[in-house]
Image (cartoon, rainbow, N blue to C red):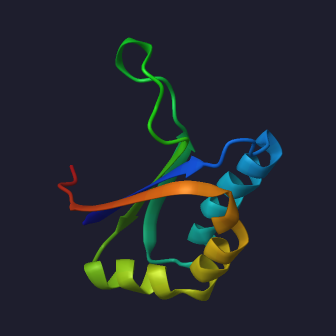
Amino acid sequence: MYQRIVCFKFKAGTSPEVVQAHMADFRQLQDAMPYIVSYSGGLAISGDQGAPPGYDSLHYLTFSTLDDIDRYFAHDAHQRFITAHKDIWADVLVLNAEIDTV
């Protein structure tokens, strides 16, 4: 199994309504791609000793294969998500990992 973690830092002044639309649209990607085994996500909270988070939202997607990650990235729904929201992103961090499942 593979985990993809996608973190977004929003540009200053991005409204809560726009952030919520971003969150909802990302969550809906799973509906368009049945090979996303699982999805969870949320807004970042303060770190250790109250340090501000480096990113504002985090999304966790689980896939069975690396090919599924490639299919996800190229999928029209994902590309539409990028086009619709890229103007509000100050930074994006993407990490992939092979994970053990219990």
> Most extreme residue toward the top, as rendered?
49
Compared with 94, 16 (above or below) is: above
Number of callouts in the render?
Answer: 0
* Residue 90 x/y as whole percent: 57, 54
Closer to us: 44 or 15:
15
In the image, what residue occupies the spot 60% across and 57% down?
Answer: 89
Which residue is depicted at the point 71% across and 48% down?
19
Q: Residue at x 75, y 42 (%)?
A: 13
Reply above or below: 94 against 58.
below
Residue 86: x and y in percent read 64, 67
On screen, residue 59 above or below 70? above
The N terminus - image quarter = bottom left
Q: Nearer the viewer, residue 35 or 18?
A: 18
Q: Nearer the viewer, residue 24 or 34?
A: 24
In the rendered view, would you say 5 is above or below 70? above
Is residue 20 left or right of 79 when viewed as pictured? right
Could you tell whether 8 is left or right of 76 in the image? Answer: left
Left or right relative to 43: residue 21: right
Give the left or right position of residue 16, taking residue 34 as reference: right
Rendering coords of residue 69 (x, y %):
37, 77
- Horizontal and vertical percent for residue 35? 44, 77
Q: Residue at x 56, y 42 (%)?
A: 42
